Image (tube, rainbow, N blue to C red):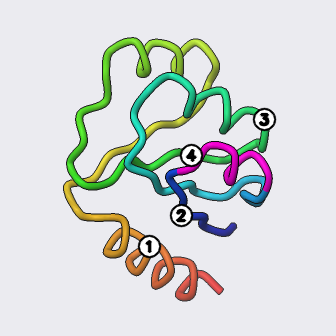
Amino acid sequence: MDGYCSDLLSDVIANAPSRSIWITIQTHENIVAASLLRDVGAVLVSGGRKIPPETIKRANEEGVVVLSSEKNSYHCACKLSKILEEKG
């Protein structure tokens, strides 16, 4: 598993590794579509951003895991990196 940190949907669509955890501050429904195009394992919305109900509904319909954190993207990426490193 890998991680990817970007707030540009075009960047994610072009570069996010399959089955990665994508960290972003974006919350609109298009994060679901972008994650499906790249087969992203989960989307982690950072910075305490509120995820709109329509985004959650679409994610549930499409089977996309959407998580959230109060921590900023930097801290989320550091924590994810540490977890992945420990798992080897």
In the picture, residue 22 is in which quadrant? Answer: bottom right
Q: Secondary structure at mark 3?
A: helix
Provide the residue span drawn in magenta: 8-14
Residue, x 50% and y 52% (percent of image)?
7
**What amino acid is at disc 1?**
Ala
Separation of residues labelled 4 and 3 (CA atoms)? 12 Å
Q: Secondary structure at mark 1?
A: helix
- Give the residue pinned by disc 3: 37
Q: Is residue 78 left or right of residue 71?
A: right
Picture coordinates of residue 66, whole percent (x, y): 46, 37
Which is more foreground, mark 2 or mark 4? 2
Image position of 23 with respect to 88: above or below? above
**What amino acid is at disc 2?**
Cys
The crowding category of the residue bearing disc 2, from other C-alpha atoms within 10 Å (few below 14, some 14 to 19, many at least 20), is: many
Separation of residues labelled 1 and 4 (CA atoms)? 13 Å
Quadrant of the snapshot with the C terminus: bottom right
Quadrant of the snapshot with the N terminus: bottom right
In the rendered structure, which disc, 4 or 3, sits on the residue that comes first in sequence?
3
Separation of residues labelled 2 and 4 (CA atoms)? 12 Å
Which is more foreground, mark 4 or mark 3? 3
- Give the residue pinned by disc 4: 42
Mark 1 touches mark 2? (CB < 8 Å): yes
In the rendered structure, which disc, 1 or 2, sits on the residue that comes first in sequence?
2
Picture coordinates of residue 78, whole percent (x, y): 40, 80
- Give the residue pinned by disc 2: 5
**What amino acid is at disc 3?**
Leu
- Give the residue pinned by disc 1: 77
In the rendered structure, which disc, 2 or 4, sits on the residue that comes first in sequence?
2
